[in-house]
Image: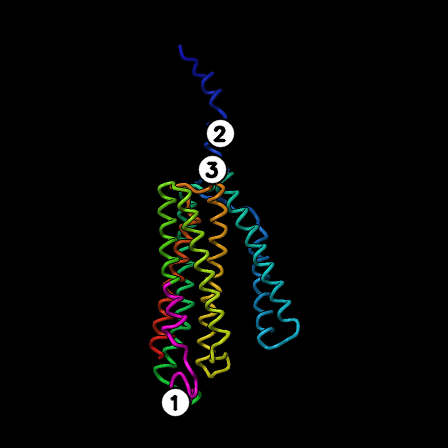
Amino acid sequence: MLDLPHVFVSRCPVILLYFIKIFPSMNNTLYHVLKYSPWPFIFSISSVILVVGLVSWIHCHTLGGYVSCVGLVLCVLTSFLWVRDFKRESLFLGWHSIVVKEGARKGYLLFFVFETIFFATFIWSYFYLGLNPSVWCGGEWPGYSIQLVDPMGIPFFNTLILLCSGASLSWAHNSVLVLNRKESLLGMVITVVLAVIFCICQMYEYRFSSITLSDSVFGSIYFSTLSLHGSHLWAAIVFLGVNIFRGYAYEFTSNYCLAFECCLIYYHIVDVIWLILFCFYYLWCC
């Protein structure tokens, strides 16, 4: 005859582990009640230091470059520690239930909407001034004596590179879903290499372009928008690098790949923004 008390006692650790994973704070809820974390405050301070340093560097202050480097190092270090805690809570402690993952996914989507609106403000300014040139532009757009970049040169080559990198990242995501670790890692590495090539070509274009930041309003909007896109692409490269290390450590499955899905969406948004910039900042302007 089956001894029910003995079975229950022998299975007690398993049952307790199940309830700890479902109710991490033991408060009868599927949500993860966050502990106090210093990383949001430290990241905010680091971002302010980075922005102040960049503005000082643009205005040719002596310490501006050093201050911006300090802010950048603090932002990268804080992001690493923040992601480490996030991965520990989800992967090792099991505190991220289905409800928590859905909330995190919606939070990322709201962040992507904010990024899209952020770029839309610059594009709207570009169209506002381009369709109705003011006297500060000499009554014409992009402005008098401004020699534009050939859109069929480096910009078109960069467009092809970025489209290929988006395709390789989608291939990597499909490989993760079918548990093909080798192809997923290969796809992510190819994406990082193509993205770095894009950034190098972009810096080469900036270096030898006749357009400068002080070339009327066009130069300001042109370099502000494209440099912001480049900074977002570098952030995507770092994001992909983290996912490469996590994939190498066997931390992704078909059901556990939220970080990689967010990276995929983020990279595709950067791709779409570049296509819009290529069509209007290069083709339409020429």
Amino acid under label 2? Leu
Which quadrant would the C terminus be assigned to in this image?
Answer: bottom left
Residue 255 visible in the shown view: no
Task: Identify the residue under disc 2.
Answer: 16
Count of number-bearing discs:
3
Of mark 1 and mark 3, the one earlier in the sequence is 3
**Mark carried by residue 106:** none
Name the foreground residue: 102 vs 124: 124
Secondary structure beneath dot 1 equals loop
In the picture shown, does residue 282 fall above or below 74? Answer: below
Marks 2 and 3 in Cβ contact (< 8 Å): no
Distance from disc 2 to disc 1, alpha carbons, whole Å, reads 74 Å
- Neighbor class of circle 2 (other Cα within 10 Å; few <14, some 14-19, many 20+) is few
Amino acid under label 1? Gly
Of mark 2 and mark 3, the one earlier in the sequence is 2
**Mark carried by residue 23:** 3
Distance from disc 1 to disc 3, alpha carbons, whole Å, reads 65 Å
